[in-house]
Image (cartoon, grey):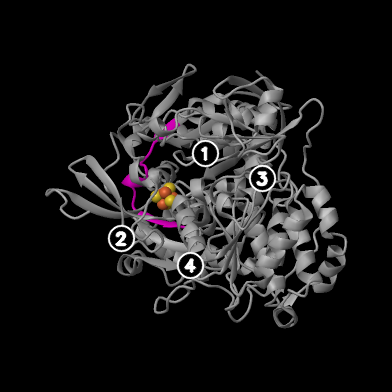
Amino acid sequence: YGGRPSGLVTTRTTCGYCGVGCALDVLTRGDELVAALPAGDGPVNRGHACVKGRFAYGFRVSEERLTRPLVRRDGRLEPAGWDEALDVVARGLREAVASGGPDAVAAISSARATNEENYLVQKFMRTVIGTNNVDNCSRLCHAPSAAGLTAAFGLPGGTDCFDDAQRADCLLVVGANPAEAHPVVGARLLQRVLRGARLVVADPRAVGLALHADVHLRPRPGTNVALFHGLAHVLLAEGLADEDFLRRRATGLPELAELLAGYPPHRVSAVTGVPEGDLVAAARLYGRAARPAVFYGLGVTEHLHGTDGVRALANLAILRGAVGGDRGYGVNPLRGQNNVQGASDMGALPDQLPGCQSVTDPVARERAARLWRAEVPARPGLRIPQMFAAARSGALRALWVIGEDVCATDPDARRVAAALEACPLVVCDELFPSETARRADVVLPVASWLEKDGTFVNFDRRFQRVRPALAPPGEARSDFAVVHAVAAALGADLGCPTPAAALDECAALAPLFAGLSHARLDREGAVCWPAPDADRPGEARLYRERFATADGLAHLSACPYLPPGEEPDDDYPLVLVTGRRWAHYNSGSMTRRGGNLRLDAVDRLDLHPVDAAGHGLRDGDPVTVESRHGTARLTVHVGEETAPGQAFCAFHFPGSGVNTLTSDRADTVTSCPEYKVTAVRLRP
Ligand code: SF4
C-alpha cells in the first residue's frame, strides 16, 4: 500500500468482527474513515484481512446510528438527554433491588465490548448491585468449549496458538467453516494444506475447506459424540494411541476404553451416516500424523450435549498424545466473535470472577473483596436463558443488555421478546434501533469498535490493543463511560477511571493476567495469556510440563453418545442447521449497513436438489420454513453443499425470523442453545 495520500492519520487497532483478531491500520482524514488496511505485521493476519474487516465500516455513518439516548414515554421511545436517561436507569435499578433484592437485577455483557468494559460491567453488578447475575454471549456459542476444555485440560481456552497450525502435518477441522466464518484463518489453513498437510474435515456441509479435504466426514447433525468415539475406537484398536503419554500425563483410560468398546466403526456409521471406510481413514490420518492439530467451531458446541462433544474431541488429542508437548497441536476452538474469549476471561460470567476464578472459591472472592472494598456474592448467578425465564416469571425486575441484540440472536425469539416485555426495566446499550432496543425502556447510544480504547482477546488467547480511530457520533459514549455513569447515578464510584487502569486492576486480581498492561501491549503488540509475569512472554502453547487440572493430568472423558433433542419425523422431515456466511456477521447490524449488503443481500435457505425437487422448489423461490417453535421466510438456494434431508441458513437477517424457528433446548452442562438441530418443514 505504498504511496498513501498525505494528510491521513493511521490508527493501529484490532478488527471488531470475528475471533481471529486481525490487526488493522485504519486511515482517517478528519472525521472520515478512508480505509481499513490489514497490518503487514499483524501477529495473526500478517497482511491479510477479509471482506468484513476490510470493507464493513460504512455502518459507522449510517443514518440509523443512534446518537442520543432514548427513553420510553407513554409507550414510545423518544430522545432524551443523558441526565434524564441515567436518572430513569438509576431509579429503575433502585426499585428492582428494593422490591426483589439484588438478584432481581441482571446484565448481559458482550463479546462486542472490550475486556475493560466487560471487567467494569461485572464489577458493577457484583459490587454496586450485589449479584452474580452477569453473563455474556459466549453462553450462546462457546460456553461448552470453556467447560469441556477445562474438564479435559484445566483452562477454558485453546491449548495452542494459531502459528502452530503452520507446523501441523494433519489438520482435523470439525464443525466449522473457517473459509466463511474466520476467513483469514481459513486461508492460512488452506495454504498449509496446499503445502502438504493432510486435511480431515468433519462437517455436514460440503463447503470451504471440505472441498480440499483428504477425507470429508458428513455426520448427521447431533451425532458428533458418536463420531468422535468412533475415531477414538479406531485409534485404540489400531495401536495409534500414545501409550507412554497416556501413562505419564493422562487419566481415565480404563473407563474410556470400556466405553469405546461399544463404538466400533459399523455401529458409529449406523448412527452418524458416515461410511465406515471414511471413519477408519480419518482416524488413521490423524493417528499416524507426527504433528496433528484440531480446530473446531460451533458445529461442536451448539448442541444438547455440546460439552460432551468438546470432551470427546479432546479425547482424541489425549489418546494421540498430541497436546502439551511437541507431538501435536492440541485442541483449538475457533471463537466466533471478536472478544468472546475476553468477555469470559474478564469474569462477565455468573460463576466466575476475572481470570477464570470461581465465585465459589473463598480465596478468590476474598482477594476481589479486598481489592474492590466490597463484599462479593458467593452464590452463582443466572445464565442468560435463566434470566429470560426469571423475567417471564416476574422474579427478574431489571435487565441491562449491553451490545447484544438478544431478540434477534437468541433462540426461540418469541419467548425472548416475551421476557423483555414482562421485565419492568430493560436498558439497552446499542449502535442501532435493534429488535432488542425497540423493546427497551431506555436505549443508550454507544461507541463502536472503531471508536473505542481497550483490548480484545482473540481465539488463541492473544490480548491485543483496540484504539479509537474516530470519535463516537453525536452524544454516543463508550460502554466503559456508560457503566461508570450508571454507577455514579447510583452514588457509587467504580474506581479505575481509564481502560488502562481497569486492565491494571484486573491484572492485580487475576494471576493469569498479572503481567499484562496497556503499556506492555503498546510495546509488544500482542501477548497470549497466561501471562503471569511482566518480564516473561505469555504462554502461546499450554501444558508443556503439566496440565492445569488439580492432579496435573489430562482427563479422558467416558461420556456416552446421547441423541439430539429433536429428530426429524413425518411432520417435520428436514433438519435445519444455522451458521454464518462470509460477507456478514451475526445479526448483521453492522455488515448490513455498508457495502457488504451488495455482496450478499438476502437470507437463503440452502437445500439439496433432491429435497428442493421433492417440494417443487427451484433456485430463487420464496419459501416458508416452519418448526415446532416458529416460522421464517427465506429464499431457496439449491445446491449440493447441503446434504439430503438437511437445510442450512444464516442468522444475519433477523427480519426473516430464523431464530423463531430454533428451540430453547440447550446443552445440559452450560445452557448453550441447540442451534444446530431443528426439525423443520417447508411450504413453497
Ligand atoms: Fe480478520 Fe475476522 Fe476481521 Fe475478517 S472478520 S478481518 S478474519 S478478524
Label 3: which residue?
204
Of the residues under marks 1 and 2, which one precedes in the sequence?
A: 2
**CA distance separating discs 2 and 3:** 35 Å
**How far across and down, in percent of the image, does residue 481 sit?**
37, 46
Of circles 4 and 1, the one toward us is 4
**CA distance separating discs 3 and 1:** 37 Å
State yes or no: Cβ of the residue under disc 1 lies below 8 Å from any atom of ligand 1: no
Quarter the C terminus occupies: top right
Residue 74 left/right relative to 387? left
Q: Is residue 676 magenta?
A: no
Label 2: which residue?
40
Say if residue 152 shows up in the picture: no
Of circles 1 and 2, the one toward us is 2
Of the residues under marks 2 and 3, which one precedes in the sequence?
A: 2
**How far across and down, in percent of the image, does residue 234 sit?**
78, 66
Of the residues under marks 3 and 4, which one precedes in the sequence?
A: 4
Magenta highlight range: 443-458
